[in-house]
Amino acid sequence: MLSQTEYEDTLWKYNNIPQSITGKNRKNIRQLYRKKLIEHQYASTYPPFQSSPYELIFLNFKTSEKILNKLINIINSSSLFVLDTESVCVFKQENKSALIQFQIITRELNTYILIIEIHHLPKPHTSTFALIKTVFESLFQSSNQIYVWGLIEELENFTQFGLFTSDQIHRCTYKNLQHDFKLYWQKNHSHDSIISKCICEQCLGIQANNPWSIQDAVGHQLHKWLDKRLTRSPFDIGLDPNLVQLNSNQVEYRQMITRYA
């Protein structure tokens, strides 16, 4: 959360972008300040969002075959999954794909979160790499339901790493919760000119043709603050503390990014 001085400074900058800055640069700067203001609003209004208990497992060149075989068995006996990805911003280039995260919800309602570190995979000819491919083969089955916030097509950028193909991605049944949430909000929160705090999309500042961010959805529906301050983190640095020897500050920094991811 911003201090009062930081908030006032950010608000002033948001409203006073120099006229000499135009076009895309102006739009990007304005968006950056707006995100800071929104983050501050949620942080100062709602308690932090707390996730349910889960077991975290990293998939990279350090992952043992025993763990991978265990995960394959768990996935094969489950049918409900949540999937997300993270990328790294590169100056004047397309974002670099960095992480695939998916959540396994078992029939016993146990939860596993897998973080696949794309830039720290084993060599393609190794048995460990083959097992990680099998993890995705088990995930991308037609009987599985996968929930996403946005379009599943963002996974296409990850096919270059050889873990799965475009055809495999589209075998599953996907549920775009971002799309469904927008329809839900429009249906249940139409404009009301009588009340002082209308929460229709227009009054909340959400354009009719724009999707909801997950932070906005959590804030307005659950009344929780979903911390998004680490959106531009270096997700490719290797988050698993077992990858290399780290000092305490490096471990703590990676733990922060991992909690965000």
Image: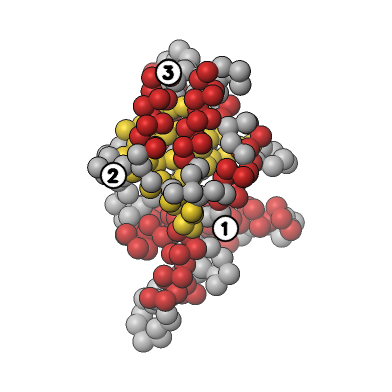
Q: Is residue 235 left or right of residue 27?
A: left
* Residue 147 in view: yes
The disc, 1 or 3, on the residue closer to the chain's N-terminal end is 1
- Mark 3 Cα within 10 Å, few/some/many (few <14, many 20+)? few
Q: Circle 3 sits on which residue?
A: 64
Q: CA distance from mark 1 to mark 2?
A: 48 Å
Between residue 153 and residue 4, name the one nearer to us.
Answer: 153
Using the rendered view, name the quadrant where residue 53 is placed: top left
Label 1 Cα neighbours within 10 Å, binned few <14 / some 14-19 / many ≥20: some
Furthest toward the bottom, the residue is: 194
* Residue 14 numbered mark, or none: 1
Q: In the displayed structure, would residue 93 be above or below residue 243?
A: below
Please tell me which residue is depicted at 41% across the width and 70% down the height of the picture: 184
> Residue 137, percent across and down?
51, 36
Determine the residue positioned at 42% across, 34% down. 114
Residue 107: mark in rendering? 2
Q: Is residue 95 above or below residue 39?
A: above
**Disc 2 to disc 3: CB gap under 8 Å:** no
Q: Which residue is painted at 46% across and 37% down in the image?
A: 138
Q: Secondary structure at mark 3?
A: loop
| 164 vs 222, nearest the viewer | 164
